Image (tube, grey):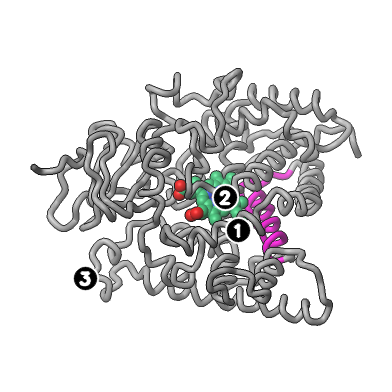
Amino acid sequence: KKKKLPPGPRGLPILGNLHMISDNLHQDLYKIAKKYGPIMTIRFGLVPVIVASSPHAAEQFLKNHDSIFASRPYNEVSQYIFYERRNLVSAKYGPYWRNMRKLCTLHLLSNAKIHQFQPMRKQEVGILANFLKQAASEGTVIDLSAKVASLSANMSCLMIFGKKYMDEDLGEKGFKALIQDILHIAALPNIAEFFPFLRVLDLQRFTHRMKELAQLFDGFLERVVDEHVIQSTEQQKQATDMVDTLMGIMQSKEAVFEFDRRHVKAVLLDLLIASTDTSSTTIEWILTELLRHPDVMKKLQSELEQVVSKNRMVEESDLENLQYLNMVIKEGCRLHPVAPLLIPHESIEDCTVDGFHIPKGSRLLVNVWAIGRDSDTWLEPEKFKPERFQGSNIDLRGQNYELLPFGSGRRGCPGLQLGLTIVRLVVGQLVHCFDWKLPNDMLPENIDMTEKFGLVTARAQHLMAIPTYRLHMK
Ligand code: HEM
């Protein structure tokens, strides 16, 4: 008896459904799923891809069959750039991933570690606020996307490497553009992966670019690690940043698995790439929605006035008391999950989901962008309305399958607590300290909302706005 695969559009010979895919993969899959249903199959070349597009489907894969779908597919980016998959993000499901994940959650992303970097976050957000205060007095238009990206890169560098690195420190294109290059290239369909026999031709010049990026980042990470080795021998310093922590683990030989300099570099690169653009892009989209909805901005400012007062800035200790801010963030993440298809998962054995046969080695994409727009789940899904979370216990930590900006289950984001703290603090501070106006009398409804798809999907156009300082403090 033939096993029943999930339905899907008929593919072309060899190409499969690749011809149906444009620049915004998540949007294309959303449209295709409307016809074929919340669990569907498409083919990228020779590779079967299962797409989950409803809360129920997400729960099936990420909870009920979590251990079967907890692996990651092979890809050339992790092979070339992430030290032959020695990082956490692209490690296969198994003992190596389990040990790595434990190491990261226990030593690098624990609550104690997050707390340790709190003064640094306060200082960096303070520096940005001072810059904006000056710009406000001069009526300058601010490139908010660029400012938030720099803030996030600075916070990531200070936490991971112990110091800030500037764009000039990495290649001609600069630090932030190169991180975006990795995220972009990692998300694009790579012909060499779908048609292994075409690999040698490198038709898209991806392999060439990956090797270039790998060399640039490796040179940079070598320098960072060397600097730390010199400092630790000269000053006997305590572990203060994540490089110190990882070097300490490497030297103590306490890791129960092979852990050498390549592993240290792979984890450092993982943390840098996983933390920088995710946080800044989430903030960028939420600020965009606030500028598009002045009434929501006003309501949030009034909450901030009540809880914090206009006599001081927002502190991290205020965050728990800012209920409306939390609703704004949930609503922003519902409409703009920055990883719209999560990171691809892969099944490690055959299984049956909702009566459909899913063969071993299938790629799984969970379209959380589509789930956030599911009209069976959300009332008026296209509208930005934080009030929909009033009195609701839907949270974004992975227990509620209608809202999964951080994924869920074994491969869910281990940096959730840190990422959420940064997003809440920065959005809260920028809205509390400043009123924001669009340049050239632009109307809120005219803000361009085009997306640029990548592993992290950002605004295609930078967000520009003019601040006015609004606190009573000098
Ligand atoms: C707002 C900020 C962030 C968002 C929205 C976010 C989102 C995500 C998503 C959607 C995944 C994939 C889940 C899956 O495949 O099922 C993920 C994985 C991951 N994230 Fe985050 N993330 C954020 C911040 C961070 C931070 C700050 C760090 C660390 C410093 C981090 C580290 C990781 C790692 C290491 C993984 C891979 C986990 C694994 O494969 O086992 N993330 N994140």
Q: Is mark 1 within 8 Å of ligand 1?
A: yes
Answer left or right for 21 relative to 295: left
Marks 2 and 1: CB-CB under 8 Å? yes
Instruction: Say which residue label 2 marks.
Output: 414
The amino acid type found where label 3 is placed reads Phe
Q: Is mark 2 within 8 Å of ligand 1?
A: yes
160 inside magenta stretch:
yes
Q: Is residue 314 above or below residue 383?
A: below
- The residue shown at (42%, 66%) is 77
- The residue shown at (63%, 42%) is 420
Instruction: Say which residue label 3 marks.
Output: 197
- What separation in Å lies between label 2 and label 1 (alpha carbons)? 8 Å
Q: Position of residue 208 (x, y in %)?
A: 39, 74
69 inside magenta stretch:
no
Q: Which secondary structure lies at badge 2?
A: loop
Instruction: State whether the magenta stretch is mostly helix, strand or loop.
Output: helix
**Mark 3 or 2 closer to N-term?**
3
**Mark 3 or 1 closer to N-term?**
1
The amino acid type found where label 1 is placed reads Cys
Which mark, residue 104?
A: 1
